[in-house]
Amino acid sequence: MPPVFGVLFDGIAYGMLLFLMSVGLSVTLGMMNFVNLAHCSFAMLGGYVTVTLMNALGWPFFATLPVAFIAGAVASIVLERLFFRRFYNSNELNQCLLTIGIVFVSIAAAAYIYGTDQQPMQLPPYLQGSIHFRGLDLAVYRLFLIAAAALITIVLVVTLEWTRFGAQVRAAVNNQRMARGLGIDVDTLFGFTFALGGGLAGLGGALAIAMLGLDPSFALTYLIYVLIVVSVGGLGSIAGSFAAAMLLGVADMAGEYYIPALSSVLIYLVMLVMIMWRPSGLFGRR
Amino acid sequence: MTSDSIAAAARETAPAGARDFLRGQIRWRWSEIVFWLATLLPFVLAPDYLVLASQVAISALFALSLDLILGFSGIVSLGHAAYFGVGAYTAGLISVWGWGEPLTGLVVAGIAAGLVGYVTSFVIARFRHLALIMITLGFGLLLQEAANSAGWLTGGFNGLQGIHTWPLLGKFEFDLYGYTAYAYALAGLFLIFLVARRIIHSPFGLALRGIRENGARMPAIGAPTHSHIRTIYTIAAIIAGIAGAMLTQSTETVSLEALGFQRSADVLVMLILGGTGKLYGGIIGAVVYMVARDQFAGLNPQYWYFWIGLLLIAVVMFLPNGILGGLELLAESAKAQWAKSKWAKTP
């Protein structure tokens, strides 16, 4: 079997991770136009929570995942109440600066507590190894990753499409002023959405350790990827984010496999062309 | 804030016309003359710190270039180090290839950075908001990765080896103590500052501020917004390239760090700290930032960024116009107090 399927498989697993880490940012950006560059710090927090619980307290891997979600959600809601909500009407430069400041602080704090080394993590034995399928080696963890992310995506889509909360969120993304006019409490709604996005990022960070590693520069390295997903996919569009994350994941893996010397150049080039071609994203409306 | 003060100043001078308004703006103030005389003090007071002083002057020049586009024209850039890096590598490369004369090196580096800036400005002028931020960020990262991949040209991760700068004007050697380096950097900063000051106080500069305040309305009154943005962006790229070349020439090294995201973020912090759209903001910010970093040099850079992060949050939350903006507020309230007390005394 040609390696193209292996690359595709790894790319999809990677894309799923990117989607989990970026979907929250996409929705909050579409809703409030708030440029939150600290989004990947929530993912990093989730990762460190999982590592600490597993290595220091001996928790099983699966038990740490909900805690990582809650940690991301709580951190994001606290930051939102303390800082972000004062800047909704500010210009994007101030929002960028504020959140870059938070990124810097989070990176330094992680380096202070955990050092700058990669964090070791031992997956449970049933998630290690790989399955042979028609001459193809499929890593069990990546299969699990794809299944878990697909499940979360379905839950997310169902929530947003078929619940009252989801309808309110879509209304607020579509037209914030009109939604307010109809009596939707956009501020509270936004708090919940923000927490949900931060929680998903935390979960994504926890799931990412075994595939991408975890060190303090995580918050900045993957921020770039998350921003690419959001801006290529279009603000507030879940389908767009999903498509962009898959595209980016597969393209990055393929680039690393076929032309390792130029892969990152290629990624940035593709991103620039995409933004210039469709400034509002693949599925964007604005 | 700034638009209000401009409007207020314009009202005061309105009967005399726009020309006199601009003339009033460009008049040299005493504080400015004192400031530039004070930049000579390091030669006398702190000869041990001249190397640091030269780095401060170079950073100030870089921050001034960012101020032209961000502070005066409202073009947010997270990748301004790209032009700094192009200048730095151009100066390094022509030195490696056997021509180490510093002044011609500056000119060539400025032209190279300006060319790159001119080409990119066509894209920059078309976008605003998030798309613009992403494009500048992506372009900076793209250039950094390209420089990393092109190891045969740039030395890749190890930086460019074998740079030697000839003595300035054939006489003054770039020594370890930094006399020549500081004099060189300061002279460059001052001359380019004069140019920037002239640009800002010209009708073209006023048009730029108009674009910053309301980009949609400027075309309606007949201002060619896109070509204005292209012009100022190219000028800013040239200045950034010259700053980069100066750093290469005075330290005789250049590495990937010259065009990294960190440098783009650093210069943004300096400018925000000092105050945007004020000409002196970048310079004050560079002095404070670089001196503070020198004082904390023992700190692991990771921890240094903790304080930078806190500082950014604090400045954005409490001091939106930077140090200079804060000082202006203080001066205004002091003036108001003084006026009030004078009223109280007169019977």
Image (tube, coloured by chain):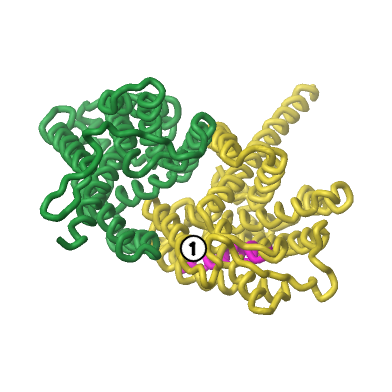
Chain colours: A green, B yellow
The residue tagged 1 is B148
Work out which quarter of the rendered image holds the N terminus of chain A and state it: bottom left
Judge whether A4 appears above or below A95 on screen.
Answer: below
Q: How many numbered marks are there?
A: 1
Judged left or right of residue B65, residue A34 is left
Q: In which image quadrant can residue B185 be found?
A: bottom right
Q: Say which residue appears at 38% left-offset and 20% top-offset.
A: A57
Asked if the stretch drawn in magenta spans residue B218, the answer is: no
Prevailing secondary structure of the magenta residues:
helix
Range drawn in magenta: B227-246
Instruction: Give coordinates of residue A285: x percent, y percent.
Output: 22, 51
Q: Say which residue appears at 20% left-offset and 29% top-offset.
A: A182
Judged left or right of residue A276, residue B268 is right
One can see residue B215 in this view = yes
Asked if the stretch drawn in magenta spans residue B238, the answer is: yes
Judged left or right of residue A265, residue B175 is right
Q: Nearer the viewer, residue A78 or A243?
A: A243
Judge whether B268 appears above or below A72 on screen.
Answer: below
Instruction: Give coordinates of residue A178: x percent, y percent.
Output: 23, 36
What amino acid does circle 1 point to?
Asn
Q: Nearer the viewer, residue A215 or B65?
A: A215
Q: In which image quadrant can residue A159 be found?
A: top left
Q: In which image quadrant can residue A165 be found?
A: top left
Q: Secondary structure at mark 1?
A: helix
